[in-house]
Image (spheres, rainbow, N blue to C red):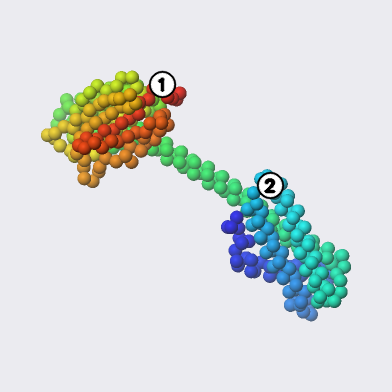
């Protein structure tokens, strides 16, 4: 509402000059006194019309602000009708009072009905123009707001689809694996064949399960072994798993892989030492416990698992947790079961 140009100081200052002059010319034309312009254009009547234009336009502007803040009635057509009736009534009252005072105090006689009717009709039209400007601005603002909201929603949907696609194919792992394969194919063809088996198993699982919402933990852990086998050919700390993990739980597909990958990428690389990951469980969660040796420039942060945590928030009231108990770190993944969600894909 405040962005409407009728509230701009320059418009408020200059507009009544033009509208008042136009009202003055219309009155001369209606009264067939257009020849008076040749004698004295800047006459007393012109200043009266400009003054009335200032009065009516300021009143109309203030009434727009007042009705915009009015909470009742809540119906827009009812509020508009009330605004229209009250604006016309007050405009007629202000113009009639101003013209009566001008005619009696300045000109020395009482105005007749025809003169009051002409002034009232013209200034009612001015008031109606203000209302039309307000309505057109409101409807245009509403349409533009809806279009912007739709464009924003479409943009967010495209970005979400792109992020989902990016997370699905895991481009960092994809290109690192392909680069490693190119090197191994020339030096160790047998190792390249083994790596390609791991690579195909991991991506077959990622791509086939991406449209499912939950999978049994057993499937995820089976692929985790293939996943670690693939990372064994990449320049990262080698991982050794300890513990079988749970068998009767459901997880978001790829969530365990994403957590383990983040652990691997934030751990200092070493050819001599392996990183031990202990898989465990309690009544409510699946636990991944390890002794962190983080890289200086790329540490393990909860923000890096924001997508995984957000997915679990949809299915469970229990959040994804990271517990620090020196010298160990434990990541707790909420256990999901069939009864917690009706969105499980098959």
The residue carrying mark 1 is 338
Taking depth in this image into account, of 94 and 8 the one nearest to the observer is 94
The residue under the point 49% across, 40% down is: 154
The residue under the point 32% across, 27% down is: 285
Say which element carries label 2: loop
- Figure label count: 2
Taking depth in this image into account, of 22 and 328 the one nearest to the observer is 328
Quadrant where the N terminus sits is bottom right
Which quadrant of the view contains residue 246?
top left
Say which element carries label 1: helix
Return the mark for residue 73: 2
Q: Work out whether 211 lies above or below 57.
A: above
Q: Work out whether 314 lies above or below 46.
A: above
Residue 38 in the figure: left or right of residue 314 = right
Which quadrant of the view contains residue 328?
top left
Taking depth in this image into account, of 299 and 143 the one nearest to the observer is 299
Taking depth in this image into account, of 115 and 23 the one nearest to the observer is 115
| Label 2 with label 1: CB-CB less than 8 Å | no
The residue under the point 24% across, 31% down is: 289
Quadrant where the C terminus sits is top left
Q: Which of marks 2 and 1 is nearer the N terminus?
A: 2
Q: Position of residue 65 (x, y in %)?
A: 64, 57
Marks 2 and 1, Cα distance to the nearest angstrom? Answer: 49 Å
The residue under the point 26% across, 37% down is: 324
Q: Where is residue 296 in the image (x, y as percent from the top left)?
A: 21, 45
Q: Where is residue 272 in the image (x, y as percent from the top left)?
A: 12, 34
């Amino acid at each position: 509402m405040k962005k409407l140009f009728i509230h701009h100081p320059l418009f408020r200052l200059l507009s009544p000059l033009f509208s008042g002059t136009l009202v003055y010319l219309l009155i001369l034309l209606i009264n067939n006194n257009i020849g008076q312009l040749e004698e004295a254009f800047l006459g007393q009547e012109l200043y009266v019309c400009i003054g009335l234009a200032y009065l009516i336009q300021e009143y109309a502007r203030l009434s727009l602000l007042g009705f915009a803040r009015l909470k009742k009635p809540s119906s827009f057509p009812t509020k508009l009708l009330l605004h229209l009736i009250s604006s016309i009534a007050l405009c007629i009252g202000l113009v009639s009072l101003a013209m009566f005072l001008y005619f009696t105090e300045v000109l020395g006689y009482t105005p007749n009905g025809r003169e009051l009717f002409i002034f009232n009709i013209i200034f009612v039209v001015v008031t109606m123009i203000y209302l039309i400007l307000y309505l057109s601005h409101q409807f245009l603002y509403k349409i533009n707001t809806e279009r912007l909201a739709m464009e924003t929603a479409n943009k967010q949907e495209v970005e979400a689809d792109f992020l989902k696609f990016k997370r699905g194919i895991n481009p960092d792992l994809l290109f690192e694996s392909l680069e490693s394969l190119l090197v191994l194919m020339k030096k160790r063809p047998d190792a390249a064949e083994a790596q390609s088996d791991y690579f195909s198993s991991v991506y077959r699982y990622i791509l086939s399960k991406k449209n499912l919402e939950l999978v049994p933990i057993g499937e995820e852990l089976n692929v985790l072994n293939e996943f670690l086998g693939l990372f064994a050919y990449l320049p990262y700390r080698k991982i050794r798993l300890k513990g079988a993990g749970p068998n009767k739980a459901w997880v978001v597909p790829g969530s365990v892989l994403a957590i383990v990958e983040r652990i691997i990428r934030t751990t200092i690389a070493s050819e001599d030492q392996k990183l031990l990951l202990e898989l465990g469980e309690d009544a409510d969660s699946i636990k991944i416990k390890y002794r962190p040796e983080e890289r200086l420039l790329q540490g393990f942060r909860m923000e890096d698992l924001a997508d995984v945590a957000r997915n679990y928030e949809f299915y469970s009231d229990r959040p994804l947790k990271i517990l620090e108990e020196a010298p160990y770190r434990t990541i707790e993944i909420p256990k999901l079961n069939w009864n917690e969600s009706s969105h499980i894909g098959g």
